[in-house]
Image (cartoon, helix red, strand yellow):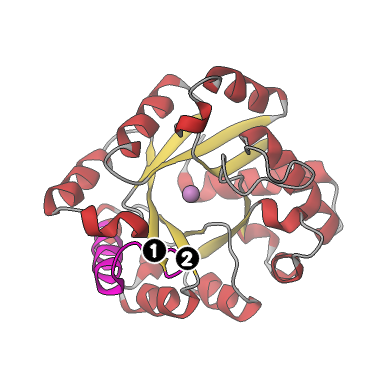
Amino acid sequence: MLTDSHAHLNAPEFDEDREETIARAREAGVTRIVNIGFNRETIPTSLKLAEAYDFIWTAVGWHPQDAKDMLPEDLDWIEELCKHEKVVAIGEIGLDYYWDTSPKEVQDRVFREQIRLARKVGKPIIIHDRDAHHDVVETLKQEKAAEVGGIMHCFSGSWETAKLCLDMNFYISFGGPVTFKNARQPKEVLAQVPLDRLLLETDSPYLTPHPFRGKRNESAHVRLVAEAAAEIKGLPVEEIARITTENAIRLLGIN
Ligand code: NI
C-alpha cells in the first residue's frame, strides 16, 4: 500500500516502456501515484496519464525554472484545469536558485500568483524549493499558504525550516536522497517529522535511490524510500507505507 506522491512518468525518459514501468509500480505495491505537470508541454501529458489510470492523479502548475514563459492565460488555464476530477493539487511551484533559469523577481511573481490561485480554488500546493529555503518560507507566510497547505517536495532543508512548514499545514515529502549513506541532513529531518505529516516520493525519473543511483528512477523504487524511512523511524515498512498513504489520502483526497 505505497504512495508515490511525486513522479514525472510522462517524461520522455519513459516513452519506450511507460506501460511496463507503471505495471512494475503496481507489482511493487504502489497503489497511488501523483504525477506532476509543470509547464505548457507536461501539463497535457500528465493529465492524459491520470485519465488513463485509475490509480494515477495529477498536479498542475508552473515550475520556477519555466517561470519566464508563463503567460496570463496559462494561469487561467491552470485555474480551469483545477475543476478536473483527477487534478488534486497545484504544483510543482516554488523557487529554484540553483539552476536560476528564470530571473528571481519573475519566479517570485509566478510563485505568488499560483499560491493566490490555490487559495481561490481551495487546492493544496506542491512546493519545489532548491537553494531557496528562506525565500520560500517567507513567501508562503506572506501569501497565507497555510490556508491550503500542501507538500514540501523532496525536502532538503533543515529541521528549523521543516518546523516552519509544518506550522503552515505542510506535509514533508522525502525521496531517494534518504537512501544515500552520506545524506545526514534529510535523515535527521525525517527522524523528527511527525508521522502524520510524512510523505514519500520518487521524483521519477530523477533522484534515484540507492542502489540504483545513476540510473533512471521509477515509481516502484518508492519501496526503497519506504524501507529507509522505516529504518529511521524504527517501524515496519508496512506501517510506514500505510501511514504515508493515509496522509496522502487525507491531504489530496486520492481514494
Ligand atoms: Ni518534480
User: Which is nearer the eye, 24 or 237?
Assistant: 24
Magenta-highlighted residues: 97-117
The residue that label 1 is drawn on is: 94
The residue that label 2 is drawn on is: 129
x, y percentage for residue 41?
Answer: 30, 37
Upstream in sequence: badge 2 or badge 1:
1
x, y percentage for residue 202?
Answer: 61, 45
Vertical comparison of 30 with 178: above or below: above
Q: Is residue 95 left or right of residue 218?
A: left
Q: Is residue 157 left or right of residue 228?
A: left
Position of the N terminus, as image quadrant, is top right
Circle 1 residues within 10 Å: few <14, some 14–19, many ≥20: many
Vertical comparison of 149 with 246: above or below: below
Q: Is residue 107 magenta?
A: yes
Would you say the magenta stretch is mainly helix, strand or loop? helix
- What residue is drawn where x is 69% and y is 60%? 195
User: Do the numbered discs 2 and 1 sit on residues whose CB atoms are within 8 Å?
Assistant: yes
